[in-house]
Image (cartoon, grey):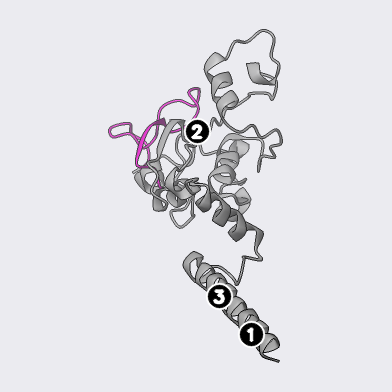
Amino acid sequence: QLKFRNQITMASSLFIAITSILTTFAHETDNQFPLPHNRYELNELNKKEAGIKSPQATLPNYVIFFVDDMGYGDVGFTGQPSINTPNIDKLASEGMILTNWYTGQPVCSPSRAAMLTGRYPVRSGCAGGWSGGVFGDASVGGLPTNESTFAAVLSQAGYATKMMGKWHLGQRSQFQPQNHGFDSSYWIPYSVDMGSSAWLPGDNGLP
């Protein structure tokens, strides 16, 4: 009887010790007891134990080339035999290649609005209603300032953002890149073959 009682005491002590360890582990790792049932949380725990930094500590860089009249096979890394694009190919080899892309519309302004906002361009007022479906040199409007762009979202996440090249989402000051989340920019308002801006001072354009 004494031996049986000692065995019960030892078993109880062992159970209490195991429970205490697991409870401490769950508390320190701030996860479900005794291990996370969520795959993402478990993966984060494993990375922490292995000394791997979280993505938040090492944010990746984003470089987006949005090019007019460019086909899928016009760069080296997609198999173009005649056009050399070594710098773009290097970026592709060091990053992630996404092989499917569906643009919001096949012309300049609407497609750019869709790319920046992730919304159909008709929802932001950047599709149709004017000649060719793009903002011309005398256009009054542009991408509304109440639209959320990925540049603004990245800025909130601590990124520095820059836009270079053809903007084509409104040339008046309220529609320019700096009012859509870009910290700096070096841009032209629309295609190079569209003439002079009606909004330039002394151009005798619109008031």
Residue lying farthest to the top in this orientation: 82
Q: Answer with mark 3 or mark 1, whichever residue precedes in sequence.
A: 1
Query: Which disc, if any, is residue 6?
Result: 1
> Residue at left 54%, top 50%?
47
Q: Nearer the viewer, mark 1 or mark 2?
A: 1
Q: Which residue carries the number 2 mark? A: 63
What amino acid is at disc 3?
Ala
Residue lying farthest to the left in this orientation: 202
Q: Nearer the viewer, mark 2 or mark 3?
A: 3
Q: Position of residue 158 (x, y in %)?
A: 38, 48
| Cα distance between the residues tagged 2 and 3 | 53 Å
Q: Which residue carries the number 3 mark? A: 17
Query: Which disc, if any, is residue 51?
Result: none
Question: Callout 1 environment at 10 Å: few (<14), some (14 to 19), or many (20+)?
Answer: few
Q: Is 66 covered by the magenta stretch? A: no
Q: In this picture, which residue range is highlighted in magenta? A: 181-206
Q: Element at badge 2?
A: loop
Q: Answer with mark 1 or mark 2, whichever residue precedes in sequence.
A: 1
Q: Is residue 18 visible from the viewing direction of this image?
A: yes
Q: Is residue 73 left or right of residue 18?
A: right
Up/down of 94 relative to 156, above or below: above
Quarter occupied by the C terminus: top left
Q: Position of residue 149 (x, y in %)?
A: 49, 49
Residue 201 figure quarter: top left
Give whichever of 58, 68 is nearer the camera.
58
